[in-house]
Amino acid sequence: MFVEEQKSFDLNLWKNISYGGSFIFKFEGSISQEIITQYLITLDKFLKKENLVRSTKKILIVSIELLQNIFKHSSPYNNIEKFCIIKCIKLKDVLLTEYLNLIDKNHFIILNDRINQLNLLDHNEIKSLYLKILKEYSLTEKNQANLGLLQVYRKTKTKIYPKFVKLNNEYFFYILKLHFF
Amino acid sequence: MNSIKIESTTKTPYVYLDPTQGLIEIKGRSIPENSVEFYKPIIEWLDKYSSQPQPKTVVNIQLEYFNTSSSKCILDIFKKIEALYNSGKDVIINWYYEEDDEDMLEAGEDYQSIIKVPFKMIEIQP
Protein backbone atom coordinates (compact mmCIF):
# COMPACT_ATOMS: atom_id res chain seq x y z
CA MET A 1 0.00 0.00 0.00
CA PHE A 2 1.30 3.41 -0.91
CA VAL A 3 1.61 5.78 2.06
CA GLU A 4 2.81 9.27 1.26
CA GLU A 5 3.99 11.89 3.73
CA GLN A 6 1.97 15.08 3.92
CA LYS A 7 4.90 17.31 2.95
CA SER A 8 4.99 15.77 -0.53
CA PHE A 9 1.23 16.06 -1.04
CA ASP A 10 -0.40 19.34 -2.04
CA LEU A 11 -4.14 19.13 -1.38
CA ASN A 12 -4.90 22.38 -3.19
CA LEU A 13 -3.03 21.20 -6.27
CA TRP A 14 -4.57 17.70 -6.16
CA LYS A 15 -8.16 18.86 -5.90
CA ASN A 16 -7.89 20.94 -9.08
CA ILE A 17 -6.07 18.40 -11.25
CA SER A 18 -8.27 17.27 -14.14
CA TYR A 19 -5.63 15.22 -16.03
CA GLY A 20 -6.52 17.06 -19.24
CA GLY A 21 -10.19 16.12 -19.01
CA SER A 22 -13.26 18.07 -17.98
CA PHE A 23 -15.00 18.02 -14.63
CA ILE A 24 -18.49 16.55 -14.61
CA PHE A 25 -18.79 16.92 -10.86
CA LYS A 26 -16.57 18.41 -8.21
CA PHE A 27 -17.31 18.77 -4.52
CA GLU A 28 -15.28 19.76 -1.48
CA GLY A 29 -16.75 20.00 2.00
CA SER A 30 -18.96 18.12 4.40
CA ILE A 31 -20.60 15.17 2.66
CA SER A 32 -24.33 14.81 3.21
CA GLN A 33 -27.11 12.61 1.89
CA GLU A 34 -28.14 15.51 -0.35
CA ILE A 35 -24.66 15.70 -1.91
CA ILE A 36 -24.69 11.94 -2.51
CA THR A 37 -28.07 12.18 -4.25
CA GLN A 38 -26.96 15.19 -6.29
CA TYR A 39 -23.81 13.32 -7.40
CA LEU A 40 -25.77 10.21 -8.42
CA ILE A 41 -28.29 12.26 -10.41
CA THR A 42 -25.47 14.13 -12.20
CA LEU A 43 -23.68 10.86 -13.01
CA ASP A 44 -26.87 9.17 -14.21
CA LYS A 45 -27.75 12.08 -16.53
CA PHE A 46 -24.21 12.28 -17.91
CA LEU A 47 -23.93 8.53 -18.59
CA LYS A 48 -27.30 8.45 -20.34
CA LYS A 49 -26.40 11.52 -22.43
CA GLU A 50 -23.11 9.88 -23.42
CA ASN A 51 -25.01 6.68 -24.27
CA LEU A 52 -23.07 4.72 -21.67
CA VAL A 53 -26.24 3.06 -20.38
CA ARG A 54 -24.65 -0.37 -19.99
CA SER A 55 -21.99 1.07 -17.70
CA THR A 56 -24.38 3.29 -15.80
CA LYS A 57 -25.50 0.85 -13.15
CA LYS A 58 -22.00 -0.40 -12.36
CA ILE A 59 -20.78 3.14 -11.87
CA LEU A 60 -23.78 4.08 -9.76
CA ILE A 61 -23.54 0.92 -7.65
CA VAL A 62 -19.83 1.50 -6.98
CA SER A 63 -20.34 5.22 -6.30
CA ILE A 64 -23.12 4.71 -3.79
CA GLU A 65 -21.02 2.22 -1.80
CA LEU A 66 -17.98 4.49 -1.72
CA LEU A 67 -19.94 7.61 -0.83
CA GLN A 68 -21.98 5.94 1.90
CA ASN A 69 -18.74 4.57 3.36
CA ILE A 70 -17.22 8.06 3.29
CA PHE A 71 -20.36 9.40 4.97
CA LYS A 72 -20.05 6.81 7.74
CA HIS A 73 -16.29 6.85 8.30
CA SER A 74 -14.95 10.32 7.50
CA SER A 75 -13.23 12.22 10.27
CA PRO A 76 -13.44 16.02 10.54
CA TYR A 77 -10.77 18.09 8.77
CA ASN A 78 -10.19 21.78 9.55
CA ASN A 79 -13.37 21.70 11.64
CA ILE A 80 -15.41 20.38 8.71
CA GLU A 81 -17.41 17.30 9.73
CA LYS A 82 -17.41 14.36 7.30
CA PHE A 83 -14.90 16.14 5.08
CA CYS A 84 -14.42 14.81 1.59
CA ILE A 85 -13.54 15.76 -1.96
CA ILE A 86 -15.32 14.15 -4.90
CA LYS A 87 -14.00 14.52 -8.44
CA CYS A 88 -15.62 13.05 -11.52
CA ILE A 89 -13.75 13.76 -14.75
CA LYS A 90 -14.48 12.92 -18.35
CA LEU A 91 -11.31 11.91 -20.15
CA LYS A 92 -11.11 10.86 -23.80
CA ASP A 93 -12.37 7.27 -23.47
CA VAL A 94 -12.57 6.98 -19.72
CA LEU A 95 -14.63 8.26 -16.82
CA LEU A 96 -12.35 8.95 -13.88
CA THR A 97 -13.65 9.26 -10.33
CA GLU A 98 -11.52 10.30 -7.37
CA TYR A 99 -12.52 10.42 -3.73
CA LEU A 100 -10.58 11.82 -0.79
CA ASN A 101 -11.55 11.69 2.87
CA LEU A 102 -9.87 11.71 6.26
CA ILE A 103 -9.68 8.53 8.33
CA ASP A 104 -8.19 7.83 11.72
CA LYS A 105 -5.26 5.49 12.36
CA ASN A 106 -7.40 2.53 13.45
CA HIS A 107 -9.52 2.75 10.34
CA PHE A 108 -6.38 3.09 8.22
CA ILE A 109 -4.95 -0.14 9.66
CA ILE A 110 -8.19 -2.07 9.12
CA LEU A 111 -8.71 -0.72 5.61
CA ASN A 112 -5.11 -1.28 4.59
CA ASP A 113 -5.22 -4.92 5.77
CA ARG A 114 -8.57 -5.50 4.11
CA ILE A 115 -7.44 -4.13 0.74
CA ASN A 116 -4.19 -6.10 0.88
CA GLN A 117 -6.21 -9.28 1.48
CA LEU A 118 -8.76 -8.57 -1.24
CA ASN A 119 -6.06 -7.74 -3.78
CA LEU A 120 -4.84 -11.34 -3.44
CA LEU A 121 -8.19 -12.75 -4.58
CA ASP A 122 -9.33 -13.36 -8.14
CA HIS A 123 -12.79 -12.42 -9.41
CA ASN A 124 -14.37 -15.80 -8.57
CA GLU A 125 -12.95 -15.69 -5.04
CA ILE A 126 -14.31 -12.17 -4.58
CA LYS A 127 -17.75 -13.39 -5.69
CA SER A 128 -17.62 -16.39 -3.32
CA LEU A 129 -16.62 -14.17 -0.40
CA TYR A 130 -19.38 -11.69 -1.23
CA LEU A 131 -21.99 -14.47 -1.22
CA LYS A 132 -20.62 -15.97 2.01
CA ILE A 133 -20.86 -12.62 3.84
CA LEU A 134 -24.28 -11.86 2.34
CA LYS A 135 -25.55 -15.27 3.44
CA GLU A 136 -23.91 -15.75 6.83
CA TYR A 137 -23.54 -12.34 8.47
CA SER A 138 -26.12 -9.87 9.75
CA LEU A 139 -25.95 -6.11 9.45
CA THR A 140 -23.77 -4.52 12.11
CA GLU A 141 -25.12 -2.18 14.77
CA LYS A 142 -24.09 0.68 12.50
CA ASN A 143 -26.27 -0.77 9.72
CA GLN A 144 -23.26 -1.93 7.73
CA ALA A 145 -23.25 -5.04 5.59
CA ASN A 146 -19.42 -5.22 5.32
CA LEU A 147 -19.99 -5.80 1.63
CA GLY A 148 -19.31 -2.33 0.23
CA LEU A 149 -15.64 -2.78 -0.59
CA LEU A 150 -16.30 -6.27 -1.96
CA GLN A 151 -19.01 -4.81 -4.18
CA VAL A 152 -16.49 -2.28 -5.53
CA TYR A 153 -14.09 -5.12 -6.40
CA ARG A 154 -16.87 -7.20 -7.87
CA LYS A 155 -18.31 -4.49 -10.11
CA THR A 156 -15.03 -2.94 -11.28
CA LYS A 157 -13.34 -6.37 -11.73
CA THR A 158 -10.01 -4.74 -10.85
CA LYS A 159 -7.67 -4.57 -7.90
CA ILE A 160 -7.76 -1.27 -6.09
CA TYR A 161 -4.71 0.68 -5.00
CA PRO A 162 -5.64 3.66 -2.87
CA LYS A 163 -3.12 6.23 -1.73
CA PHE A 164 -2.84 7.13 1.94
CA VAL A 165 -1.34 10.46 2.94
CA LYS A 166 -0.12 10.54 6.52
CA LEU A 167 -1.07 13.87 8.08
CA ASN A 168 0.19 13.04 11.56
CA ASN A 169 0.35 10.02 13.86
CA GLU A 170 -3.44 9.85 14.11
CA TYR A 171 -4.91 10.77 10.72
CA PHE A 172 -4.55 9.88 7.06
CA PHE A 173 -6.10 11.07 3.83
CA TYR A 174 -7.60 8.09 1.99
CA ILE A 175 -7.56 8.73 -1.77
CA LEU A 176 -9.17 6.34 -4.18
CA LYS A 177 -9.03 6.68 -7.94
CA LEU A 178 -11.21 4.51 -10.19
CA HIS A 179 -11.43 4.38 -13.98
CA PHE A 180 -14.53 3.27 -15.85
CA PHE A 181 -14.27 2.44 -19.54
CA MET B 1 -54.26 -7.34 8.79
CA ASN B 2 -53.83 -4.30 6.58
CA SER B 3 -52.14 -3.85 3.25
CA ILE B 4 -49.17 -1.49 3.07
CA LYS B 5 -48.31 0.83 0.22
CA ILE B 6 -45.15 2.96 0.27
CA GLU B 7 -44.51 5.30 -2.64
CA SER B 8 -41.03 5.42 -4.14
CA THR B 9 -38.51 8.20 -3.51
CA THR B 10 -35.12 8.98 -5.09
CA LYS B 11 -33.58 6.56 -2.57
CA THR B 12 -36.28 4.05 -1.68
CA PRO B 13 -38.46 1.72 -3.72
CA TYR B 14 -42.22 1.45 -4.18
CA VAL B 15 -43.55 -1.22 -1.85
CA TYR B 16 -46.95 -2.90 -1.93
CA LEU B 17 -47.92 -5.62 0.51
CA ASP B 18 -51.40 -7.11 0.10
CA PRO B 19 -52.44 -9.85 2.54
CA THR B 20 -55.70 -10.71 0.74
CA GLN B 21 -53.94 -11.43 -2.56
CA GLY B 22 -50.77 -12.82 -0.95
CA LEU B 23 -48.84 -10.25 -2.96
CA ILE B 24 -45.51 -8.60 -2.14
CA GLU B 25 -44.08 -6.07 -4.58
CA ILE B 26 -40.88 -4.01 -4.37
CA LYS B 27 -39.93 -1.82 -7.32
CA GLY B 28 -37.36 0.88 -7.97
CA ARG B 29 -34.15 2.02 -6.37
CA SER B 30 -33.09 0.99 -2.87
CA ILE B 31 -30.18 3.05 -1.56
CA PRO B 32 -31.33 4.38 1.82
CA GLU B 33 -28.66 5.37 4.30
CA ASN B 34 -30.53 3.43 6.96
CA SER B 35 -31.89 0.37 5.21
CA VAL B 36 -32.92 -1.36 8.45
CA GLU B 37 -35.25 1.52 9.27
CA PHE B 38 -36.80 1.41 5.81
CA TYR B 39 -37.27 -2.37 5.68
CA LYS B 40 -38.35 -2.85 9.31
CA PRO B 41 -42.10 -2.36 8.68
CA ILE B 42 -41.91 -4.77 5.75
CA ILE B 43 -40.24 -7.46 7.87
CA GLU B 44 -42.77 -6.89 10.66
CA TRP B 45 -45.66 -7.12 8.17
CA LEU B 46 -44.22 -10.40 6.88
CA ASP B 47 -44.01 -11.79 10.42
CA LYS B 48 -47.72 -11.10 10.90
CA TYR B 49 -48.63 -12.35 7.41
CA SER B 50 -46.75 -15.60 8.03
CA SER B 51 -49.12 -16.49 10.86
CA GLN B 52 -52.10 -16.42 8.46
CA PRO B 53 -50.72 -16.64 4.92
CA GLN B 54 -52.65 -17.18 1.71
CA PRO B 55 -52.33 -20.62 0.06
CA LYS B 56 -50.08 -18.94 -2.51
CA THR B 57 -47.74 -15.97 -1.99
CA VAL B 58 -46.31 -14.11 -4.98
CA VAL B 59 -43.25 -11.89 -4.55
CA ASN B 60 -42.46 -9.49 -7.39
CA ILE B 61 -39.10 -7.73 -7.22
CA GLN B 62 -38.08 -5.23 -9.89
CA LEU B 63 -35.12 -3.21 -8.70
CA GLU B 64 -33.19 -0.61 -10.63
CA TYR B 65 -30.21 -0.87 -8.30
CA PHE B 66 -29.57 -1.17 -4.57
CA ASN B 67 -26.86 -0.69 -1.97
CA THR B 68 -25.29 -3.54 -0.05
CA SER B 69 -27.13 -2.82 3.20
CA SER B 70 -30.41 -3.14 1.26
CA SER B 71 -29.14 -6.44 -0.15
CA LYS B 72 -29.08 -7.85 3.40
CA CYS B 73 -32.62 -6.61 4.08
CA ILE B 74 -33.90 -8.08 0.81
CA LEU B 75 -32.32 -11.39 1.82
CA ASP B 76 -34.15 -11.15 5.17
CA ILE B 77 -37.43 -10.81 3.25
CA PHE B 78 -36.58 -13.84 1.13
CA LYS B 79 -35.73 -15.85 4.26
CA LYS B 80 -39.25 -15.15 5.56
CA ILE B 81 -40.64 -16.37 2.23
CA GLU B 82 -38.41 -19.44 2.43
CA ALA B 83 -39.81 -20.21 5.89
CA LEU B 84 -43.34 -20.03 4.45
CA TYR B 85 -42.33 -22.42 1.68
CA ASN B 86 -40.76 -24.82 4.17
CA SER B 87 -44.03 -24.81 6.13
CA GLY B 88 -45.78 -26.20 3.07
CA LYS B 89 -47.16 -23.04 1.48
CA ASP B 90 -46.97 -22.31 -2.22
CA VAL B 91 -44.65 -19.37 -2.94
CA ILE B 92 -42.94 -17.88 -5.98
CA ILE B 93 -40.35 -15.13 -6.20
CA ASN B 94 -40.37 -13.31 -9.54
CA TRP B 95 -37.17 -11.36 -10.09
CA TYR B 96 -37.58 -8.88 -12.94
CA TYR B 97 -34.55 -7.39 -14.68
CA GLU B 98 -34.15 -5.34 -17.81
CA GLU B 99 -32.62 -6.82 -20.93
CA ASP B 100 -28.82 -6.25 -20.87
CA ASP B 101 -28.87 -5.38 -17.18
CA GLU B 102 -26.18 -7.83 -16.13
CA ASP B 103 -25.93 -6.29 -12.64
CA MET B 104 -29.53 -6.97 -11.65
CA LEU B 105 -29.40 -10.37 -13.39
CA GLU B 106 -26.33 -11.22 -11.32
CA ALA B 107 -28.03 -9.97 -8.13
CA GLY B 108 -31.04 -12.19 -8.82
CA GLU B 109 -28.77 -15.16 -9.42
CA ASP B 110 -27.04 -14.47 -6.11
CA TYR B 111 -30.33 -14.74 -4.24
CA GLN B 112 -31.40 -17.73 -6.30
CA SER B 113 -28.25 -19.54 -5.14
CA ILE B 114 -28.96 -18.79 -1.48
CA ILE B 115 -32.74 -19.13 -1.13
CA LYS B 116 -34.28 -22.51 -1.77
CA VAL B 117 -37.74 -21.58 -3.08
CA PRO B 118 -39.22 -21.39 -6.60
CA PHE B 119 -37.37 -18.38 -8.05
CA LYS B 120 -38.12 -17.14 -11.54
CA MET B 121 -35.81 -14.75 -13.43
CA ILE B 122 -37.92 -12.64 -15.81
CA GLU B 123 -36.27 -10.48 -18.46
CA ILE B 124 -38.22 -7.37 -19.43
CA GLN B 125 -37.75 -4.69 -22.05
CA PRO B 126 -36.40 -1.37 -20.76
Image: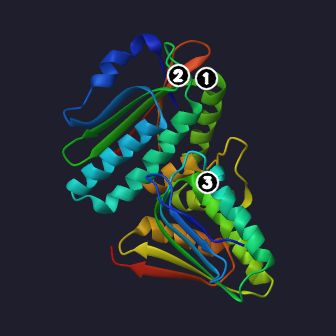
The residue sitting at the front extreme is: B2
Nearer the camera: disc 2 or disc 1: 2
Query: Which residue is disc 2 drawn over?
Result: A81
What type is the residue that disc 2 sits on?
A: Glu
Whether B121 is drawn above or below A132: the answer is below
Name the residue at 45% across, 64% down.
B103
Nearer the camera: disc 3 or disc 2: 3
Nearer the camera: disc 1 or disc 3: 3
The chain ID associated with circle 2 is: A
What numbered label is drawn on residue A104? 1
Q: Are marks 2 and 1 in contact (CB under 8 Å)?
A: no
Asked whether residue B123 appears in the rendered view, the answer is: yes
Whether B21 is drawn above or below A179: the answer is below
What type is the residue that disc 1 sits on?
A: Asp
Display coloring: rainbow
- Quarter of the image where the N terminus of chain B is located: bottom right
Query: Which residue is disc 3 drawn over?
Result: B38
Q: Is residue B47 left or right of residue A166?
A: right
Q: Nearer the viewer, residue A81 or B103?
A: A81
| Secondary structure state at the residue bearing disc 2 | loop
Dot 2 alpha-carbon crowd within 10 angstroms: few under 14, some 14 to 19, many 20 or more = some
Q: Earlier in the sequence, mark 2 or mark 1?
A: 2
As measured in the structure, the alpha-carbon distance from the residue carrying label 2 to the one carrying label 1 is 13 Å
Dot 1 alpha-carbon crowd within 10 angstroms: few under 14, some 14 to 19, many 20 or more = some
Residue A73: % across, % down: 58, 32
| Secondary structure state at the residue bearing disc 1 | strand
What type is the residue that disc 3 sits on?
A: Phe
| Secondary structure state at the residue bearing disc 3 | helix
Asked whether residue A132 appears in the rendered view, the answer is: no
Residue B80: % across, % down: 73, 71
